[in-house]
Image (cartoon, helix red, strand yellow):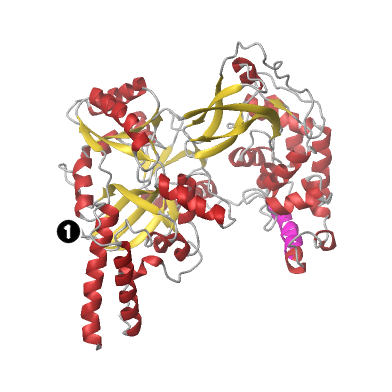
Amino acid sequence: MNKSEAKQRVEELRELLNKANQAYYQEALPFISDKEFDEKLNELQKLEDEFDLHAPESPSKRVGGDVSSNFETVKHPVPLLSLDNTYNEEDLNDFDARVKKILGHDNYNYMVELKFDGASIRLRYENGTLVLGATRGNGQQGDDITNNLKTIQDIPLELSGDAPDVVEVRGEAYMEREAFAKMNERREEEGLNVFANPRNSTAGSLKMQDPKAVAQRPIRFFAFDMLLDGEDDSMTQYRKAKMLQEFGLPVSEHYRICYEIDEVHSIIKEWDELRHKLPYETDGVVIKVNQSHLRDQLGTTSKFPRWAIAYKFEAEQATTTVNDITLQVGRLGTITPVAELAAVELAGTTVKRASLHNEDEIQRKDIRIGDTVVVEKAGEIIPQVISVVDPDREDRNPPFIFPQDCPACGSELIKYEDEVAWRCINPTCPPQVRIRIEHFASRDAMDIEGLGESVVDQMVSAGLIQTFADLYELEKDHIIELERMAEKSAQNLIEAIEKSKKQPFERVIYALGIRFVGKTVAKDLAKAFKTMENLQSQNQEDLEAVDSIGPRIAESVVSFFKTEKNQQIINRLRDHGLQFEQEEEELVSNIFNGKKIVLTGSLPTYTRKEASDLIEKHGGKTSSSVSGNTDFVLAGESAGGKLDKANKLGVPVLDEAKFREMIGE
């Protein structure tokens, strides 16, 4: 066979295998056997290798190739917003009423679709070719996992039909229940850890570094939306579903048009029964305004589109026995009771523990050791005990008495006014020590590279550290004996700890782990009081004078600094040379001096943090909500409710170009 003949045969094989893939994965109508498919695929691979006829769109590339091990971050041109959700019909009726009120008419209908329980992804096709695949990420940006997604047979590398030059596709990667179960059986036989559920397994698989390994996972895909340039007023969600199918993308058969909200309720009841017969997990129904052009008028909030909502099915339930009730200590000393259960299968996972939340919850439901209880997954995610079966039986154990002492350190527990949780306020309590040190070293706090959970656990277990102040007294010889801690890594850790002393004052405040004090509050405290000594001396009234500080935060800050052990730790940190004073930044200009500016939407080039920093460098201050005291709103794409409120109040609105002009960039 010469190269010309080989090229012709390669083209024939690619066409055959592409059709076979579509028939098998999208139409569920295979026309060749698995054995024949594998034989043709092997023939194709050999010809491509022998005559150097490789092509990125070839079916042979579905097994994955050699790629970079690092995922790049990509910004989504239009944010992938999550959906507001409800579990009851009344909320759904309220949603319908809001849509009518905003639009001022009822000349619209709904597209109702199943909600898949998997991992949301975005695909970009240019001139019919898949050029990018990304995770949802934080909605604004995600990870570029193109090479991993190319291994999913459901996702075409080339679109069919008359596809536009650019198509942005939104969809869900998932695993079917049976395929997931078989995969877990194989892993168990191989002595590997089994996966918790199809959703987590799918999400984790997509982030694996080796596409060949991803190709071994039984991941499927459904497309549920797409974005097109220049959509006209005739475009609908229903039409998009049909177009997606025409382009060769798999679309679930379960979508309907509903003209009244009562029809939506009927479909929900029908699909609530149907879901148990489906081969994949679904946790609800998505209701979207069908007419695309109405979505701009309906707009979005900061989190959700106003033109769509998810109705969540009632969670699956199971009965099991409470073998014991144990207590778990959190970073800030919160004591959470946990039911240790006889293992039970629930919503695709094996459940052995369930949070009982707090003492009041145990008493309200009268949960006792030895009880048979009903367990469900809240949102089919978090196991919780719903009720006790036969609470009137005579042979029940005595009621559970909540201990008054911390199960980890023996310190007396306290309960703050207006709270239901018991707390241990001993900062040297072992479980808290570990979690507090991890928080102290985290990226947004002191950013001590190399000081992860396992290293902290080893250090605490070995008695090397009891508080985060002890970190600054460590020497290389102290830690080099720890597991997997070679001389070089030990030296790197010592240097990272030393480097952390240069972190600014606001990060030091955040790193202390004061209850209710997040990054923004820590920054405001640093700006308002300038030094640690000054901050420590403030009373509650002084603290509440700061704009972002309310009574709850102020009380927590005062309580923290009054605790003797905390004072000792702070004094040690001061002795070790951490930044206890706010560095005054020289203003670039005072164009926004005294102005309050609200950020909303996605800006073309600036991240929200970059824009906030620029506002402050030019004398302004950012605010989270629009009011009559707001001076400007800096708005990007998908601005939503804040932009609407600004227009209503007559607050001046800036786009990024005008903002750049004002600050002289």
Q: Looking at the image, can residue 558 be seen?
A: yes
Q: Residue at x 23, y 56 (%)?
A: 248
Residue 203 is situated, as x and y percent measured from the top left of the image, at: 46, 50
Front one among 72 and 218: 218
- For label 1, the crowd category at 10 Å Cα-Cα, with few meaning under 14, some 14 to 19 and many 20 or more, is few
Q: Is residue 67 left or right of residue 581?
A: left
Q: Residue at x 67, y 24 (%)?
A: 421
Please give the range of residues in magenta.
Answer: 492-503
Is 562 placed above or below 188 here?
above
Read off the residue under disc 1.
161
Residue 533 is situated, as x and y percent measured from the top left of the image, at: 77, 39
Front one among 490 and 508: 490
Q: Quadrant of the N terminus?
A: bottom left
Total marks drawn? 1
Q: Secondary structure at mark 1?
A: loop
Magenta stretch secondary structure, dominant: helix
Specify the quadrant of the image occupied by residue 357: top right
Q: Is residue 51 left or right of residue 344?
A: left
Q: Residue at x 40, y 26 (%)?
A: 87
- Give the residue type that dot 1 points to: Gly
Residue 85 is situated, as x and y percent measured from the top left of the image, at: 39, 31
Front one among 289 and 500: 289
